[in-house]
Image (tube, rainbow, N blue to C red):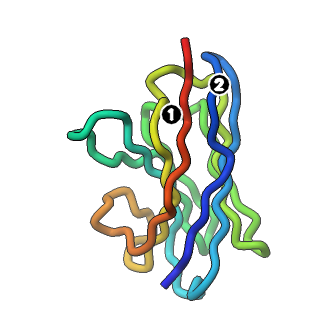
Amino acid sequence: QVQLVESGGGLVHTGDSLTLSCAASGSTWNTLSRAWFRQAPGKDREREYVAVMHWITGSTEYADSVKGRFTISRDRAQNILYLQMDNLKPEDTAVYYCAASTISAFAKDPEHIGSWGQGTQVTVSS
Protein backbone atom coordinates (compact mmCIF):
# COMPACT_ATOMS: atom_id res chain seq x y z
CA GLN A 1 0.00 0.00 0.00
CA VAL A 2 1.18 3.49 -0.86
CA GLN A 3 0.70 6.41 1.50
CA LEU A 4 0.19 9.79 -0.17
CA VAL A 5 0.30 13.17 1.55
CA GLU A 6 -0.65 16.36 -0.28
CA SER A 7 0.31 19.90 0.62
CA GLY A 8 0.19 23.36 -0.91
CA GLY A 9 -3.50 24.17 -1.12
CA GLY A 10 -4.91 27.54 -0.16
CA LEU A 11 -7.00 30.58 -1.04
CA VAL A 12 -5.94 32.56 -4.10
CA HIS A 13 -7.44 35.04 -6.54
CA THR A 14 -8.35 34.61 -10.18
CA GLY A 15 -5.21 34.55 -12.32
CA ASP A 16 -2.92 33.52 -9.46
CA SER A 17 -0.68 30.46 -9.37
CA LEU A 18 -0.35 27.66 -6.84
CA THR A 19 1.76 24.53 -6.61
CA LEU A 20 0.57 21.33 -4.96
CA SER A 21 2.94 18.62 -3.76
CA CYS A 22 2.33 14.95 -3.05
CA ALA A 23 4.84 12.88 -1.13
CA ALA A 24 4.67 9.09 -1.42
CA SER A 25 5.87 6.44 0.99
CA GLY A 26 5.37 2.74 1.53
CA SER A 27 5.21 0.19 -1.30
CA THR A 28 5.86 2.47 -4.29
CA TRP A 29 7.89 0.00 -6.36
CA ASN A 30 4.94 -1.16 -8.48
CA THR A 31 3.40 2.22 -9.23
CA LEU A 32 2.42 2.55 -12.90
CA SER A 33 0.98 6.05 -12.81
CA ARG A 34 0.34 8.91 -10.44
CA ALA A 35 -2.33 11.49 -10.95
CA TRP A 36 -4.22 14.47 -9.63
CA PHE A 37 -7.98 14.43 -9.29
CA ARG A 38 -10.32 17.06 -7.89
CA GLN A 39 -13.78 17.19 -6.39
CA ALA A 40 -15.72 20.44 -6.57
CA PRO A 41 -18.17 21.54 -3.86
CA GLY A 42 -21.56 19.82 -3.86
CA LYS A 43 -22.45 16.44 -2.50
CA ASP A 44 -23.21 14.92 -5.91
CA ARG A 45 -20.05 16.09 -7.62
CA GLU A 46 -17.83 13.28 -8.85
CA ARG A 47 -14.09 13.14 -8.39
CA GLU A 48 -12.69 14.19 -11.78
CA TYR A 49 -9.34 13.55 -13.36
CA VAL A 50 -7.05 16.57 -13.77
CA ALA A 51 -3.63 15.29 -14.88
CA VAL A 52 -1.71 12.01 -14.93
CA MET A 53 1.89 10.93 -15.29
CA HIS A 54 3.18 7.55 -16.48
CA TRP A 55 5.55 6.84 -13.62
CA ILE A 56 8.07 4.85 -15.71
CA THR A 57 8.39 7.12 -18.75
CA GLY A 58 7.34 10.46 -17.29
CA SER A 59 4.80 11.00 -20.09
CA THR A 60 1.88 13.21 -19.11
CA GLU A 61 -1.73 13.84 -20.09
CA TYR A 62 -4.19 16.52 -19.02
CA ALA A 63 -7.90 17.09 -18.85
CA ASP A 64 -9.09 19.59 -21.46
CA SER A 65 -10.25 21.98 -18.73
CA VAL A 66 -6.70 22.50 -17.43
CA LYS A 67 -4.57 21.94 -20.53
CA GLY A 68 -2.16 24.83 -21.02
CA ARG A 69 -2.63 26.10 -17.44
CA PHE A 70 -1.60 23.17 -15.22
CA THR A 71 1.67 21.23 -15.29
CA ILE A 72 2.27 17.87 -13.63
CA SER A 73 5.87 17.05 -12.75
CA ARG A 74 7.89 14.95 -10.35
CA ASP A 75 11.02 14.50 -8.33
CA ARG A 76 11.42 10.80 -8.95
CA ALA A 77 14.31 10.37 -6.52
CA GLN A 78 12.21 11.84 -3.70
CA ASN A 79 8.96 10.21 -4.88
CA ILE A 80 7.22 13.57 -4.98
CA LEU A 81 4.55 14.54 -7.50
CA TYR A 82 3.74 18.19 -8.20
CA LEU A 83 0.91 20.10 -9.82
CA GLN A 84 1.77 23.62 -10.92
CA MET A 85 -1.46 25.54 -11.45
CA ASP A 86 -1.30 28.83 -13.34
CA ASN A 87 -3.99 31.30 -14.36
CA LEU A 88 -6.39 29.84 -11.81
CA LYS A 89 -10.12 30.35 -12.28
CA PRO A 90 -13.01 30.17 -9.79
CA GLU A 91 -14.14 26.94 -11.46
CA ASP A 92 -10.86 25.37 -10.35
CA THR A 93 -12.10 25.55 -6.75
CA ALA A 94 -12.10 22.01 -5.38
CA VAL A 95 -10.45 19.56 -3.06
CA TYR A 96 -7.44 18.21 -4.94
CA TYR A 97 -6.40 14.60 -4.43
CA CYS A 98 -3.16 12.87 -5.25
CA ALA A 99 -3.59 9.32 -6.52
CA ALA A 100 -1.53 6.29 -7.46
CA SER A 101 -2.33 3.29 -9.62
CA THR A 102 -0.67 -0.09 -9.99
CA ILE A 103 -3.02 -1.30 -12.74
CA SER A 104 -3.19 1.58 -15.23
CA ALA A 105 -0.32 3.42 -16.91
CA PHE A 106 -2.51 6.51 -17.37
CA ALA A 107 -5.09 6.25 -14.65
CA LYS A 108 -7.95 8.66 -15.35
CA ASP A 109 -10.78 6.61 -13.88
CA PRO A 110 -11.14 6.66 -10.08
CA GLU A 111 -11.90 2.95 -10.34
CA HIS A 112 -8.27 2.39 -11.41
CA ILE A 113 -6.82 4.17 -8.37
CA GLY A 114 -5.47 2.06 -5.54
CA SER A 115 -4.22 4.79 -3.22
CA TRP A 116 -5.53 8.27 -2.44
CA GLY A 117 -4.17 11.16 -0.45
CA GLN A 118 -6.29 12.96 2.10
CA GLY A 119 -6.92 15.92 -0.19
CA THR A 120 -6.00 19.59 -0.07
CA GLN A 121 -8.43 22.47 -0.54
CA VAL A 122 -7.88 24.98 -3.34
CA THR A 123 -10.18 27.99 -3.38
CA VAL A 124 -10.06 30.57 -6.15
CA SER A 125 -11.94 33.78 -5.52
CA SER A 126 -13.14 36.03 -8.31
Q: Position of residue 33 (x, y in %)?
A: 51, 69
Disc 2 marks a residue whose amino acid type is Val
Residue for badge 2:
12
Horizontally, is 96 left or right of 17 in the view? left
Of badges 1 and 2, the one in the foreground is: 2
Residue for badge 1:
66
Q: Earlier in the sequence, mark 1 or mark 2?
A: 2
Tell how many labels. 2
Q: Is residue 14 above or below residue 82?
A: above
Disc 1 marks a residue whose amino acid type is Val
Nearer-the-camera pick, 80 or 57: 80
Q: Secondary structure at mark 2?
A: strand
Horizontally, is 122 left or right of 7 in the view? left
Assess disc 2: are there few (<14), some (14-19) or many (≥20) residues with their C-alpha within 10 Å of its C-alpha.
some
Residue at 37% of width from left, 36% of height from top? Answer: 40
Q: Secondary structure at mark 1?
A: loop
Q: Is residue 52 above or below residue 41?
A: below
Q: Position of residue 119 (x, y in %)?
A: 50, 53
The C terminus lies in quadrant: top right
Residue at 32% of width from left, 60% of height from top? Answer: 110
View extreme (top): residue:
126
Horizontally, is 71 left or right of 42 in the view? right
Nearer-the-camera pick, 124 or 54: 124
Q: Quadrant of residue 76?
A: bottom right
